[in-house]
Amino acid sequence: MKKITFPLISLILLTFILTGCLPKSQNKEKKTTPESTIKTDEQLIREALAKKSNIPLKDFKEVEIVIEENDNQFASGTAGTAGGGHWFAAKVNSEWEIAWSGQGFIPCEDIEPYNFPKTMISQCYDAKTDDFIKR
C-alpha cells in the first residue's frame, strides 16, 4: 500500500500545481498610481492656457511653455511658438487659473482678484484712470 500511496499523492500534488489549484501567495503587491497619471505644473498650466485661449488642447501641444517663476501658489512665464506672450497664473481650489495672458499692459482688473505678490507684478494698468498703478 505504501508503494501506491506515495506516487498517488505525488500525482495529485503535481496536478494541483499544474492546474493552479493551490492557494496563491498572500504577499500581494500594493497597487500604485503610475507616475504618468500625475500631471506636472507645466502640463496643468498648458491646459489652463489652452482653455483661456479657447484652443483645443491637442492643438496647443506645439506651443512652448516656459515657467519663469512658480511658488506653488502663483506662477508666471511665457507661451508661444515664435516669441509668444507672457502669462500669469494662480492656484484656485488646487487648480491653475490663468489670470492674464498676452502682450503689453497688464490690466489691474484681471489680476486684482488673485492678489499676486507685488514682486511678481509690480504695476498694472487701470483702465478707469487711464494710468499705471504701482502695486
Image (cartoon, grey):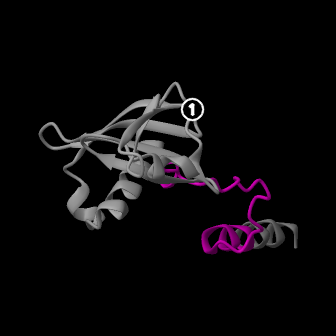
Please report the residue visible at 57 percent of the width from the left and 32 percent of the height from the top. Answer: 117
Task: Check the image and name the residue furthest to the left.
Answer: 82
Comparing 75 with 17, the one in front is 75
**Residue that badge 1 annotates:** 117
Q: Main secondary structure of the magenta part?
A: loop
> How many numbered marks have been drawn onto this rendered protein structure?
1
| Residue 86 within the segment the image draws in magenta | no
Comparing 20 with 134, the one in front is 134
Please report the residue visible at 38 percent of the width from the left and 57 percent of the height from the top. Answer: 47
Q: Is residue 82 above or below residue 54?
A: above
Q: Amino acid at mark 1?
A: Pro
- Circle 1 SS class: loop
Task: Check the image and name the residue furthest to the front.
Answer: 129
Please report the residue visible at 48 percent of the width from the left and 37 percent of the height from the top. Answer: 75
Comparing 89 with 15, the one in front is 89
Q: Is residue 134 above or below residue 64?
A: above
Q: Quadrant of residue 78?
A: top left
Residue 82: image location, x then y, percent: 12, 39
User: Visible in this render: residue 126?
Assistant: yes
Residue 22: image location, x then y, percent: 75, 69
Residue 1: image location, x then y, percent: 87, 73
Q: Is residue 131 above or below residue 92?
A: above
Residue 94: image location, x then y, percent: 62, 53
In the image, taking residue 60 as reference, residue 109 lies left or right, namely right
| Residue 15 within the segment the image draws in magenta | yes
In the image, taking residue 22 as reference, residue 118 lies left or right, namely left
Stretch of the chain drawn in magenta? 12-39
